[in-house]
Amino acid sequence: MKIIRRFVNTLKIGAGICLLGMVFLTGADVVGGHFGHPILGSEELVSLLGCLLIAFSLPFAHMEKSHIGVEMLYLLMPRRVKLLLDITIKLACTGFFSLAAWQSYLYAAEMKKVGQVSPTIQLPVHYIIYGVFFGCLVLSIVIFAEFFSYFGRIKDE
């Protein structure tokens, strides 16, 4: 779990760098636009950084349980039902994000093969898609590791 946390923290730092890049780039574009010199492709770069920001921050948000959940019915359920529901959800989420990672990898490989670039600044987009792949992969590993933690709870029941 220590290695997983190291990957998650590295991605968290990467997400912070993306956020700072978005802030500074937007600010520089606004100031430059005021003086008649906007930054070419700034909207494009900000949107690409936003993709990386989301993909890189998801594993940390999940690990820290900082996502939103509606638990009105869940709180009324018996402990065994909650445990079974948690296990089922962990498996489904692992499957979903593993599939998302796999498809992102295939899509990035295809974009690299055809030489797809962004429209304005001609940045190869496969780098961004590989970043999304890595974020989804780490998230699926985090969720799968949590799935195994439930086996100790089943024995306690």
Image (tube, rainbow, N blue to C red):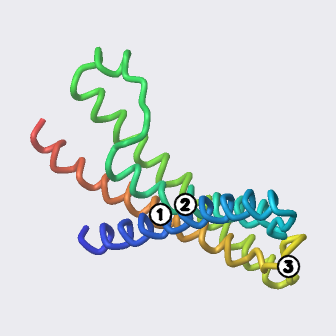
Q: Position of residue 25 (x, y in %)?
A: 67, 65
Q: Position of residue 8 (x, y in %)?
A: 38, 66
Label disc, if present, on residue 103 of the rendered structure: none
Horizontal side of residue 125 vs 103, given as left or right: right
| Drawn side of residue 40 relative to residue 139, left or right | right
Report how far apart the C-alphas of labels 2 and 3 lie in the structure.
22 Å
The residue sitting at 21% across, 50% down in the picture is: 151
Amino acid type for the residue under numbered disc 1: Gly
Which of the 4 quarters of the picture holds residue 154?
top left
Kindly indicate the quadrant of the structure image that contains residue 23. Answer: bottom right
Task: Please tell me how crowded label 1 is: few (under 14), some (14-19), or many (20+) other residues with Cα within 10 Å.
Answer: some
Give the quadrant of the N terminus: bottom left
Cβ atoms under marks 2 and 1 closer than 8 Å:
yes
* Rendering coords of residue 108 (x, y %): 72, 74
Secondary structure at badge 3 equals loop
- Give the alpha-carbon distance from disc 2 to disc 1, as whole Å: 5 Å
* Label 3, residues with CA under 10 Å away: few <14, some 14-19, many ≥20: few
**Residue found farthest to the left:** 156
Query: Label 2 is placed on what type of residue?
Result: Leu
| Quadrant (top left, top right, bottom left, bottom right) of the C terminus | top left
State whether residue 136 appears in this view. no
Question: What residue is shown with label 2?
Answer: 19
**Label whose residue precedes the other's in the sequence (2 or 3):** 2
Measuring 42% from the left and 68% from the top, which residue is drawn there?
13
Q: Earlier in the sequence, mark 3 or mark 1?
A: 1
Find the distance from the CA under tag 3 to the CA under tag 1.
24 Å
State which mark lies toward you, 2 or 3: 2
The answer, for residue 131, to whether it is visible in the render is: yes
Residue of label 1? 16
Task: Name the residue that disc number 3 marks.
Answer: 122
- Callout 3, which amino acid? Gln
